[in-house]
Image (cartoon, rainbow, N blue to C red):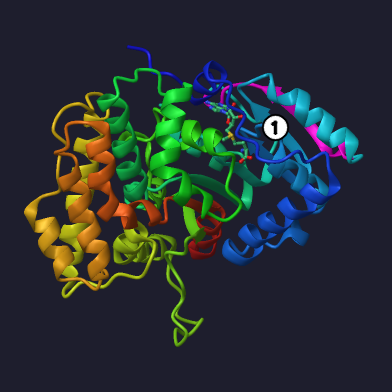
């Protein structure tokens, strides 16, 4: 069976993920501040250095991020599979007098796009994880970079999305108990609001509830096979890229590490992969979590992944018994510093799925409210640097 692509899903349900009307100067300023916080503070990519540089935005959407890059003086190649996005994009660029910053705009799927130039920065934010051939697109982006150029990718992290999976499972079960088939209709929206409205409203700058429900919870892409992780992306670039930065961070240089201790790209990437493993439970709970032993932490991460794989299949049959994490998952948790009330709420959450009617389910979920109020670190940004150039220089120097 042919799988739906993200832009087909967006067209079918009339979802425009863009949050703000960036034609208004104030909205643009606010959005630019968020992007600066992301790129400069979290990802260590100084905006000033992008002036006059060629930047690729692959999957640019209505151009929110591209517009900020345009304001900084970057020269933009904008690609999207959905031709509808360019109408608002063109209008927004024109209204800010930035149309001249666009080098090229292309209607193409990322999988079919062949770059005609080299870029200092290539971004693929908000969709690449949904592409069947995402590893190949990563390598196409990498090949299109200038030596030492950067590429940034954003994706739902496979462990960090745990809390979203639990929210989705409760929403699907509630709809099943009410015999609601249309997850995008009014009745489903009311159920969603009753279950998740309060906690979604507590997020910083929340999107309109229905848009969030459709894009983040009802989305067919909230299953394990579409989630991604920094280690998987680093592996897919086949040593052509070096870890540069990420949000949340997975690698900080130790304060006492001497800069003369130069490590090569594979060793550097290995440090990032280890950093990810060390933090995986932090991503699940959105707070620092320590286990009694590293083995327990690793087992907890493995069990979480296995549970999410089962839950992803269950999403197709939400009237069946809910899969539960293994007993050793709960045992590892009991040996961690995850707060007692959170652990209790998790147990209440799984128990609530014994309810046979929607009112009973709603009541049974009350002691599990902390699960709905908790947000893991689900959405990650990763920046990689093209590393081939360094390798070539090293080889050159080593030649007699
Ligand atoms: C969530 S939006 C993100 C837009 C923009 N990158 C941002 O971060 O603001 C995802 C965009 O990717 C586009 N898209 C989805 N799948 C695509 C694909 N396979 N190739 C190219 N664009 C795609 C969609 O049409 C949509 O405009």
Residue carrying label 1? 62
Task: Check the image and report above or below for 225 versus 398.
Answer: above
How crowded pointer 1 is (Cα within 10 Å; few <14, some 14-19, many 20+) is rated as many
Membership of 100 in magenta stretch: yes
Residue at (43% x, 71% y) in the render: 263
Residue at (15% x, 28% y) in the render: 320
Coordinates of residue 79 in the picture (x, y in percent): 66, 29
9 sits left or right of 31 in the view: left
Quarter of the rendering containing residue 265: bottom left
Residue at (42% x, 56% y) in the render: 377
Viewer can see residue 192: yes
Task: Check the image and report above or below for 100 versus 363.
Answer: above
Magenta segment: 98-111
Image mark count: 1
> 351 or 78, which lies in front?
351
> 65 or 339, which lies in front?
339
Coordinates of residue 84 in the picture (x, y in percent): 69, 20
Q: Is mark 1 within 8 Å of ligand 1?
A: yes
Membership of 365 in magenta stretch: no
């Amino acid at each position: 069976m042919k799988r739906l692509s993200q832009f087909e899903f967006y067209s079918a349900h009339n979802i425009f993920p863009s949050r703000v009307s960036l034609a208004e100067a104030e909205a643009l300023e606010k959005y630019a501040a968020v992007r600066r916080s992301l790129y400069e503070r979290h990802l260590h990519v100084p905006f000033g250095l992008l002036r006059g540089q060629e930047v690729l935005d692959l999957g640019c959407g209505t151009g929110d991020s591209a517009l900020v890059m345009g304001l900084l003086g970057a020269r933009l190649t904008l690609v999207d599979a959905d031709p509808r996005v360019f109408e608002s994009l063109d209008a927004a660029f024109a209204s800010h007098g930035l149309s001249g910053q666009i080098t090229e705009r292309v209607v193409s799927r990322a999988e079919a796009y062949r770059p005609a130039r080299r870029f200092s920065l290539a971004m693929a934010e908000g969709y690449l994880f949904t592409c069947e051939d995402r590893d190949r697109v990563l390598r196409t982006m990498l090949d299109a970079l200038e030596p030492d150029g950067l590429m940034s990718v954003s994706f739902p992290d496979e462990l960090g999305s745990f809390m979203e999976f639990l929210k989705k499972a409760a929403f699907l079960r509630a709809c099943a108990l009410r015999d609601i088939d249309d997850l995008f209709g009014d009745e489903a929206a009311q159920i969603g609001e009753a279950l998740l409205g309060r906690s979604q409203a507590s997020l910083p700058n929340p999107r309109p509830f229905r848009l969030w429900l459709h894009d983040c919870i009802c989305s067919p892409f909230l299953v394990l096979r579409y989630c991604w992780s920094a280690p998987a992306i680093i592996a897919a670039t086949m040593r052509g890229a070096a870890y540069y930065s990420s949000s949340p961070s997975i690698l900080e240089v130790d304060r006492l590490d001497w800069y003369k201790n130069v490590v090569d790209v594979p060793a550097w990437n290995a440090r990032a992969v280890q950093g990810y493993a060390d933090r995986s439970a932090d991503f699940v709970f959105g707070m620092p979590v320590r286990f009694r032993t590293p083995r327990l932490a690793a087992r907890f991460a493995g069990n979480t992944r296995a549970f999410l794989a089962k839950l992803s299949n269950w999403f197709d049959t939400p009237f069946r018994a809910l899969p539960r994490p293994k007993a050793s998952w709960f045992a590892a948790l009991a040996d961690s510093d995850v707060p007692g009330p959170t652990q209790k709420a998790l147990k209440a959450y799984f128990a609530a799925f014994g309810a046979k009617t929607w009112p009973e389910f709603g009541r049974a979920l009350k002691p599990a409210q902390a699960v709905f109020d908790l947000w893991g670190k689900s959405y990650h940004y990763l920046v990689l640097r093209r590393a081939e150039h360094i390798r070539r220089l090293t080889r050159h120097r080593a030649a007699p």
